[in-house]
């Protein structure tokens, strides 16, 4: 590494202007566009009015954007030191919510903090990625072959997954597990272990099914045959499909969706916001939104690939994976492709704490991007 | 150095693998979206429109019936009732058993509930018990855990503040049958009632109003998910009747225990002020279903409490028909006003002898005297000279034997025979038939209402028709002013002669009904008695000192009386029929006198008729009425 290059890194890493310059404004613009889609959808969900959803949505996004940019300027090495503390806090909150959180829609998920209701599981997703990235930061390829080395991070995944299942919130637990698995995979876990784990899951799943809550089981049954109980749990999916279907290729037009506006659609402003969009803007609009979401996922993955230290790579990949899982679960859910599971569409659905946590995640992602070339102990690649 | 690049390479490969997986998954979502939105889109779009919205009707409150002063005669009140939703309980019988322990259910109620539960889908509520009082409701609420599937809600029920006093005019409401429901789907709603008799039936459509519509989202088995839209229905119209509820009450009281009926009309405009039939019944019993025992009691009662005798009871008018016969004679120039006829006590036509009620005869009488003494022979002779067809035509002009447009669906037309009618029956019309019709016997069949109309027309010379409707939805209906009715087109002189005769009946010494003379100062009543045999009296009986009082009740003659007052400025006309009351003068006369006294003296101060808008188009003589038949 040349002296010049080292100086360059130092300058760009620690100057405020340089940091601002290194922020990917294109990416920020994509996020703004997605929030704009959310505004339009919530405006329609509010019956053609900014109240009660859209105006709050855009205010929260503005706040989230400031938060994101602030976090982006924080040195990634400092953030890395906060990984395990953040993880500890998140686990504590998860335990707390099980004992004193209040019940919403049949599950203990929420906790009151700073005037808002938070789902600790949202925070857990990011904290877990940070903790895993921190653990694997210094891990060599050889170390990744050592099962004893993999045991602590595996436990770090298992603990929150079990806690979230107990809430119970199956959907989020699956997302957390999937994100953890993605980080493991990217960190270099051997393929045969991946195969082994997959096999174990395949064997355990039927047994675990026996321990599921009734409503969780009902969701899975409903998923397999939504028409079997149209008014019970399958009702949401059928209504959602009907609304999407009535959108057709080009949609019924902005504010013209009948199913959403006649309140056929349940929870149209939260979980089923994509259905609103699909009904009013049709297949074309739906695919456009999916394209925008794909660009954001790809951008996160691109940031991961461009980063030159393992912590940043794993963190960016984990956050990108988290966002992808949100999108996939939500959209697949409203189309009846997977069981319904209380997962919002990030930056589009109405909901405060979820959006803040998503923006915190993007703040970390952007910090990775800003600090992609910094000197970072053993984890940094030599050019 | 190598370490790191190995690790980086693995990361890059696996990250790209993940990206490929993510893109593949999003691509799959897009494909799925195409399937749902474009390929299956049409099917779902149809589903969206047809399958999900169901219109459900909401009952409109039934219009009220008011008397002429705005007093409620039929209203609505809240009805707290217990409903059973079968699907909310595992054991319908168990729930009902528990319910019976709290609020006893009769066996026939259990049978009805079981039948309805079987017939309806399990989420449709079935009425278990209507008209719960607070105590029952409290008992049910406290024991709610033992009564799964039972819920309490409030509907409306018909309220008749005057009960049996007006039962025959107002009629009653009862649960609709299947044909009714086919006509108006609103009637399928639980607790809804349809007018089954009287004004309630006549004005059923107007009173019923229009059902509201709630657009509901329902699932494929019809269970309601949520309400989407709510259109208020139109409340039924209030109908203001011509009835004076105070007068009605006193008229019914005057009838006492007799099987009798009376009609009081405003003779200037045909408004029926009171129409009473005794005995009566409690109309609210029909609301919840009449018990078998009650029904048997009603139908086996020889005084027939369910029949509106005032409008549907048919009686031979007897001597009350004599005014019509006299007028027919004058009109046909068969007699003159002053012409005197001799009554020797009988009239022989061919080899048949027709007796006068006075064995010794009345001697020479003119028309006024004939009426005053109610001489039969005089009117035998008038009828003989006039002929039945002329008499029938005159009767029809007085509203007898013609259809009267009264707002009572079961009102009867009665019968005034003509020769043609008799020949159409395949029989010959004999001169003897004409003779007996001269004194209101024979085939004549008239209702007390028709007799009251006759009295009104005699009093005013106008062709008033009886009606019960004064206002609809606060709009005064045509027919409430005397000018709305055309004159009868009879010479005033002829009418005056008949009225004089009626005045003499009551007010001159020797008149047949001096008992009916009013005791009010300065007001006099003109009237006519009548008594009609139910069974033929043979000459043998007559010669053996026959007394109708000795007959069993159901064979005694009916007693009739028609009257109007004040005789010089007629305001009220009435008819009274006391079934099997023997002589008209002795039985019906005092009743008529007392009723007329009430009509004249019930103080209208403080009971001013409420101001009403007049209907825009007034067709003189033809009171237009809305509503159904």
Image (cartoon, rainbow, N blue to C red):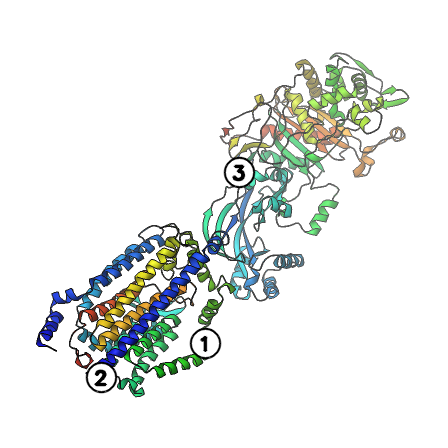
| Location of residue B93 with respect to B508 vertically, above or below | below
- Residue A272 rendering spot, x and y as whole percentages: 38, 60
- Of labels 3 and 2, earlier in sequence is 2
How many numbered discs sit on the rendered protein?
3
**Quadrant showing the N terminus of chain A:** bottom left
Task: Please name whichever residue, A242 or A45, is drawn nearer the observer in this view of the structure.
Answer: A242
- Residue B19 rendering spot, x and y as whole percentages: 31, 70
| Parent chain of label 2 | B
* In the rendered image, residues at marks 2 and 1 fall on the same chain: no
Q: CA distance from mark 1 to mark 3?
A: 63 Å
- Residue A371 rendering spot, x and y as whole percentages: 17, 71
Residue sitting at x 40%, y 67%: A341
SS for dot 1: helix
Q: Residues within 10 Å of mark 2 (few under 14, many from 20)?
A: few
Residue under label 1? A209
| Location of residue B525 with respect to B58 vertically, above or below | above
Between marks 1 and 3 in the image, the one whose residue lies nearer the viewer: 1
Task: Please name whichever residue, B190 or A123, is drawn nearer the observer in this view of the structure.
Answer: A123
Give residue B237's mark: 3
Residue under label 2? B3
Instruction: Give left or right: position of A30 versus A75.
Output: right
Between marks 2 and 1 in the image, the one whose residue lies nearer the viewer: 2
Residue A239 occupies quadrant: bottom left
């Amino acid at each position: 590494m040349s002296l010049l290059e080292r100086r360059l890194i130092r300058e760009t890493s620690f100057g405020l202007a340089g940091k601002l310059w290194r922020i990917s404004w294109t990416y920020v613009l994509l996020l703004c566009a997605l929030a704009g889609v959310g505004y339009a959808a919530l405006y329609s969900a509010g019956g053609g009015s900014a109240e009660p959803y859209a105006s709050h949505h855009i205010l929260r996004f503005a706040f989230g954007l400031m938060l994101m940019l602030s976090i982006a300027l924080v040195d990634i090495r400092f953030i890395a030191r906060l990984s395990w503390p953040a993880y500890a806090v998140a686990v504590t909150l998860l335990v707390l919510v099980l004992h004193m959180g209040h019940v919403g829609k049949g599950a203990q998920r929420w906790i009151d903090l700073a005037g808002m209701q938070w789902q600790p599981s949202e925070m857990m997703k990011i904290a877990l990625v940070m903790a895993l990235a921190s653990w694997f930061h210094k891990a060599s390829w050889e170390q990744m072959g050592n099962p004893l080395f993999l045991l602590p991070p595996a436990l770090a995944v298992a603990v929150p997954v079990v806690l979230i299942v107990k809430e119970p919130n199956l959907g989020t637990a699956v997302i957390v597990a999937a994100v953890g698995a993605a980080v493991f995979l990217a960190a270099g876990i051997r393929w045969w272990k991946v195969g082994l784990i997959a096999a174990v899951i395949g064997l355990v799943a039927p047994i675990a099914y026996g321990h599921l809550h009734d409503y969780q089981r009902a969701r899975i049954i409903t998923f397999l045959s939504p028409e079997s109980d149209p008014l019970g749990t399958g009702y949401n999916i059928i209504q959602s499909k009907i609304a999407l279907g009535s959108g057709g290729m080009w949609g019924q037009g902005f504010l013209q969706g009948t199913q959403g506006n006649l309140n056929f659609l349940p929870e149209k402003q939260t979980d089923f916001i994509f259905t609103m969009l699909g009904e009013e803007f049709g297949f074309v609009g739906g695919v456009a939104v999916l394209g925008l979401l794909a660009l954001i996922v790809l951008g996160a993955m691109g940031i991961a690939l461009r980063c030159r230290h393992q912590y940043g790579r794993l963190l960016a990949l984990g956050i990108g994976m988290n966002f992808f899982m949100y999108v996939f679960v939500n959209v697949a859910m409203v189309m009846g492709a997977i069981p319904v599971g209380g997962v919002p569409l990030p930056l589009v659905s109405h909901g405060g704490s979820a959006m803040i946590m998503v923006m915190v995640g993007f703040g970390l992602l952007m910090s990775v991007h800003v600090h992609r070339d910094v000197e970072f102990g053993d984890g940094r690649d030599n050019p | 150095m190598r370490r790191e690049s190995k690790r980086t390479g693995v990361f890059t490969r696996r990250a790209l693998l993940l990206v490929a997986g993510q893109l593949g998954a999003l691509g799959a979502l897009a494909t799925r979206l195409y399937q749902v939105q474009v390929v299956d889109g049409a099917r779902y779009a149809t589903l969206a429109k047809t399958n999900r919205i169901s219109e459900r009707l909401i009952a409109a409150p039934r219009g009220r019936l008011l008397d002429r002063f705005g007093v409620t005669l039929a209203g609505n009140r809240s009805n707290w009732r217990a409903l059973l939703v079968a699907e909310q309980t595992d054991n319908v019988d168990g729930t009902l058993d528990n319910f019976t322990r709290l609020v006893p259910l009769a066996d026939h109620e259990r049978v009805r509930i079981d039948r309805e539960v079987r017939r309806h889908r399990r989420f449709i509520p079935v009425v278990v018990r209507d008209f719960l009082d607070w105590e029952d409701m409290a008992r049910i609420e406290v024991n709610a855990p033992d009564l799964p599937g039972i819920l309490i809600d409030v509907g409306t029920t018909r309220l008749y503040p005057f009960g049996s006093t007006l039962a025959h005019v107002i009629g009653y409401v009862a649960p609709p049958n299947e044909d009714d429901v086919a006509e108006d789907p609103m009637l399928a709603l639980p607790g809804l009632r349809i007018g089954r008799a009287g004004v309630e039936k006549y004005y059923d459509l107007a009173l019923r109003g229009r059902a509201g519509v709630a657009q509901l989202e329902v699932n494929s088995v019809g269970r309601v998910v949520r309400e989407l839209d709510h259109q208020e229905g139109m409340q039924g119209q209030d109908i203001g009747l011509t009835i004076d509820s105070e007068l009605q009450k006193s008229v019914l009281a005057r009838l006492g225990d007799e099987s009798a009926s009376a009609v009081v009309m405003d003779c200037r405009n045909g408004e029926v002020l009171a129409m009473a039939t005794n005995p009566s019944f409690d109309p609210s019993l029909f609301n919840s279903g009449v018990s078998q025992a009650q029904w048997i009691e009603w139908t086996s009662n020889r005084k027939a409490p369910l029949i509106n005798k005032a409008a549907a009871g048919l009686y031979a008018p007897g001597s009350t028909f004599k005014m019509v016969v006299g007028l027919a004679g004058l009109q046909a120039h068969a007699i003159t006003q002053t012409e005197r006829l001799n009554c020797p006590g009988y009239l022989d036509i061919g080899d048949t002898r027709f007796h006068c009620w006075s064995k010794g005869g009345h001697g020479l009488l003119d028309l006024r005297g004939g009426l005053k003494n109610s001489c039969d022979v005089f009117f035998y002779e008038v009828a003989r000279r006039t002929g039945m067809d002329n008499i029938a035509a005159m009767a029809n002009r007085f509203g007898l034997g013609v259809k009267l447009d009264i707002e009572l669906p079961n009102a009867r037309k009665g019968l005034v025979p003509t020769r043609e009618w008799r020949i159409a029956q395949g029989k010959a019309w004999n001169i003897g038939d004409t003779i007996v019709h001269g004194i209101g016997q024979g085939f004549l069949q008239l209702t007390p209402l028709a007799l009251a109309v006759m009295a009104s027309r005699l009093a005013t010379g106008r062709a008033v028709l009886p009606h019960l409707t004064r206002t609809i939805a606060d709009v005064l209906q045509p027919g409430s002013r005397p000018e709305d009715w055309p004159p009868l087109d009879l010479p005033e002189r002829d009418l005056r002669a008949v009225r004089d005769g009626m005045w003499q009946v009551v007010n001159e010494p020797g008149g047949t009904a001096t008992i009916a003379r009013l005791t009010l100062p300065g007001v006099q009543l003109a009237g006519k008695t009548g008594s009609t045999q139910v069974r033929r009296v043979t000459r043998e009986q007559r010669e053996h000192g026959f007394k109708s009082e000795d007959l069993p009740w159901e064979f005694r003659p009916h007693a009739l009386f028609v009257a109007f007052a004040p005789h010089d400025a007629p305001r009220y006309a009435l008819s009274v029929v006391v079934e099997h009351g023997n002589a008209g003068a002795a039985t019906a006369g005092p009743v008529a006198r007392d009723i007329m006294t009430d009509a004249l003296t019930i103080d209208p101060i403080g009971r001013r008729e409420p101001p009403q808008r007049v209907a825009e188009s007034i067709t003189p003589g033809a009171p237009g009425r809305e509503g159904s038949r």
